Amino acid sequence: MAPNTMTDPTRRTRAGRVRPPAAASLPTRRPMRRSDAGWALLLVGPATVGLSLFYLWPALETFYESFTTSGPFGGHTWSGLHNYATLLHDTELRGALLNTVWYTLFGLLGVPVSLVLATLLAKPGRRFVAGYRVLMFLPAVTMPAAIAIVWKWLYHHDYGLINLGLGKLGVQGPYWVSDPHTALIAVAIVGMWAGIGYGVIIMMAGLEGIPPHYYEAAKMDGAGPLRRFFSITIPLMSPTIFFMTVLSVIASLQTFDLIYVLIGSSNPSLPQTRTVLYLFYEHAFTQNDRGYGSAIAFSLVVLVIAVTAVQFKLQKRWVHYE
């Protein structure tokens, strides 16, 4: 049967070849008018100016100053790679980098904790679920300085609630933020607790995207809660877990507020808790060595980019996208 010429957009020539539809039948892209370009520039302009002034220009200025040496009364002189050569032999930087790695590992522990809590809170029918969700999210909307002040009071050796509770059990509480053996763990616990609320919200959003018939089919096959969690929830939540892992690593590498408030500059446990970002603060703002501080800051930026790139490279092995 010959094709209907009224509905079939193709045409056949005398040689039997199929002629493509006429160009007029294809959708055409309307050329951008000057008014459209003007509106686009007007909408993008403020954000571009803000990013350029407060992010791009400071980054370029920091990169330039990392090749200079600051004078005692201001100003700077070009010193080339001297600051970066000093970084390679700086024992304080090695200790700060090791502390930063520990903070990062503790921060990663918050990802599975957030997933477990989100799984428990996402189940319908539980009592006080809305109240629990609010309590979980409160740290995410609280300033880090306020969180550190509250936990500094909780960690206090003489009248802190933690040591008072341990005293009721007959246990002598340590000097949490003054003892070099416990200070890093104490700060890491606060950082992990502060980030769990945001992680729970993201995890709950990811759980909403899992089709319920997967769990129904697993129940019919006799799979228990743990089997469903490890065989269905974790594989289907791998993109969300990867997203939270990247954010947790970046946030842990930039730990500063908690150490500044909880530890302070005169604390004997500062060398055991100081991070790379805190070391940058000491050199750039306390010692007024802006050149060396800029070298530390730019090295930290390179470290964050390198770690994030490795994470994106490895995610192909365990992240499953539908």
Image (spheres, grey):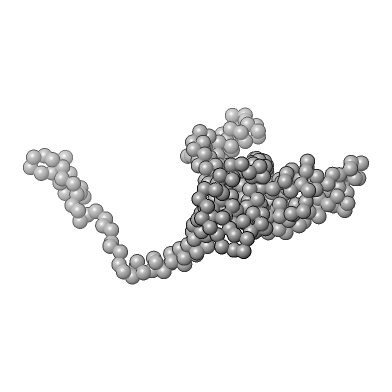
Drawn side of residue 37 relative to residue 167, left or right: left
Frontmost residue, 183 versus 166:
183
Question: Residue 89: horizontal and vertical position, in percent?
Answer: 61, 41
Total number of numbered discs in the rendering:
0
Viewer can see residue 61: yes
Question: Residue 120: horizontal and vertical position, in percent?
Answer: 67, 43
Identify the residue at image location x=7%, y=42%.
14
Drawn side of residue 170 relative to residue 60, left or right: right
Question: Residue 307: horizontal and vertical position, in percent?
Answer: 54, 42
Drawn side of residue 198 relative to residue 67, left or right: right
Q: From this viewpoint, which residue is outermost toward the left? A: 14
Q: From this viewpoint, which residue is outermost toward the top? A: 222
Identify the residue at image location x=65%, y=50%.
279
Identify the residue at image location x=81%, y=52%.
154
Frontmost residue, 17 versus 85:
85
Viewer can see residue 133: no
Query: Eyeballing the image, is 230 above or below 199?
Result: above
Identify the residue at image location x=59%, y=45%.
87
Which quarter of the figure has residue 135? bottom right
Question: Residue 200: horizontal and vertical position, in percent?
Answer: 64, 48
Which quarter of the figure has residue 12? top left
Q: Which of the image's four quarters has the N terminus?
A: top left
Frontmost residue, 106 versus 22:
106
Drawn side of residue 157 relative to residue 322, left or right: right
